[in-house]
Image: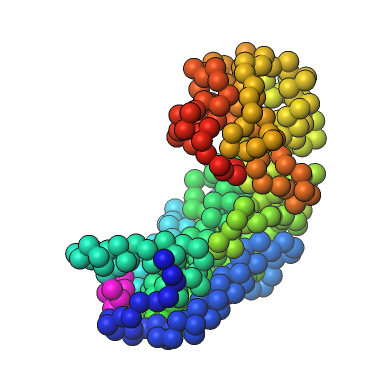
Amino acid sequence: MSAVPMPSTFPRRGTFSDNPEDYAESIRAICAQRDRWLAYGLKAGPSDRTAAESAVAQLYRRSGRPEPKFSWVASPVAAAEFMTSRPIADSAGAGSLIATLLSSSRRRMDQRIDRRQIEWPQQYYYSDNNAQRDLQARIDVARRSPTDAARADISPDPIIRRTVRKSLHTSLFDGVATAVRTLAPRPFGTVSWYGQQEAHRVAYYDTYRSFGLMTFGREDNELLDIQSALIESTGWWWAFDDIAVMSERPTALHTEPIPDPVHGEVRLHHSTSPAVEFGDGSGVHVLNGTVIPAWVIHDPTVERITVERNVEIRRSAIERIGWDSYLDQAGLRLIDTDDDPGNPGCILQLFATPAGWGDEGRILLAVNGSRERDGERRRYGLRVPGAFSSAVDAAGWTYGLAGADYGRLLRRT
């Protein structure tokens, strides 16, 4: 199916242009703005304390609370220690009042955006079968990239949701904020704001207003500006009745693009040191988006891998050692080996899992059909059910196929 846009008889009010190339150029501008917000969310180095304190003070005043005193700490870990080591008054719920203020603003803006979308074709509710098929074909094309979506005559609303809000949520909230939370679980019983890692919320609404797609009320615009200032200036923070606890941003933050990103998503990664590190020395190790204990990087051993219960940590540690070395050291029992019919010239190997892993599964060792950046093909292990005794059958199972059907495929993993 070609990406040539279909003529539309629907009103195009509130969009960029009826010209598909002009529309695609506008979408590229949205992606550039998303990348700017992503840079704020990943920024390392000292906070702009003056700007951060001014923004938080405005939120207190708008919530009917007097301006707080500010206590700055080096990291969320230090914040947790600060908040649990002394009584901090929160009888009137300053944090809850601010949370209600911001959530009410988002609800108002969402309602306006939802009403805006009725100006567009009801893209998922055609009654005519031919129109439905045409729509699905255009949506399939649109999944390739945001600009393809524009050329396929998809409205700005799903494009903005996917390439701005969802992309930033994946990179910053699901990625960075989730990793940092492993350092400091919330024992302090109050609302946490993630500062720069909340960029997905503000960027989504700011895209609508800055590109002229939506006009929000004065209060909501002012609250967006306040939140923008916090994202640009600081890390995590917490609101209490008389004091706001402010955490500095990381001193170092390392990422890599996720495999084949369509919307600019990144994930945390550093192979020799913490992917996120703070000024007090606290930090979190992450390999290819997986949060790991420090031993996986600095001292992976067969013994530690055997007793590790988390499958992803175990996989990361094995890949750190290298599958060949791990197999030699662990003495895994080989059950079956065969040529990989879907990856000519490569071998499939099926091993029994070590006794310490606590199950009767199998490990299928295969070779990636695609070369890494250094030109090598990485070996990788896949967990498969213990019922398999054939390496080809196990490989087919990973694709939802019987071994015989898998053997007839020509594929690259």
| Front residue (pair 71, 107) | 107
Say how the picture is coloured.
rainbow
**Residue 369 in picture, x, y percent from top left:** 65, 43
**Residue 190 in picture, x, y percent from top left:** 49, 50
The N terminus sits in image quarter: bottom left
| Front residue (pair 201, 116) | 116
The C terminus sits in image quarter: top right
Helix, strand or loop for the magenta stretch, by majority: helix
Residue 84 visible? The answer is no
To which quarter of the image does residue 254 belong? bottom right
Name which residue lies at 54% across and 55% down: 170
From this view, report whether residue 366 is shown above or below residue 151: above
| Front residue (pair 224, 207) | 207
| Front residue (pair 313, 337) | 337
**Residue 29 in picture, x, y percent from top left:** 56, 78
Residue 335 visible? The answer is yes
Name which residue lies at 51% across and 25% down: 393
**Residue 266 in picture, x, y percent from top left:** 62, 57
From this view, report whether residue 236 is shown above or below residue 116: above
Specify whether 42 is left or right of 124: right
Name which residue lies at 68% across and 34% down: 346
- In the rendered image, residue 119 lying in the magenta stretch gets the answer yes
Name which residue lies at 69% across and 43% down: 287
Q: Which residues are magenta?
A: 114-121
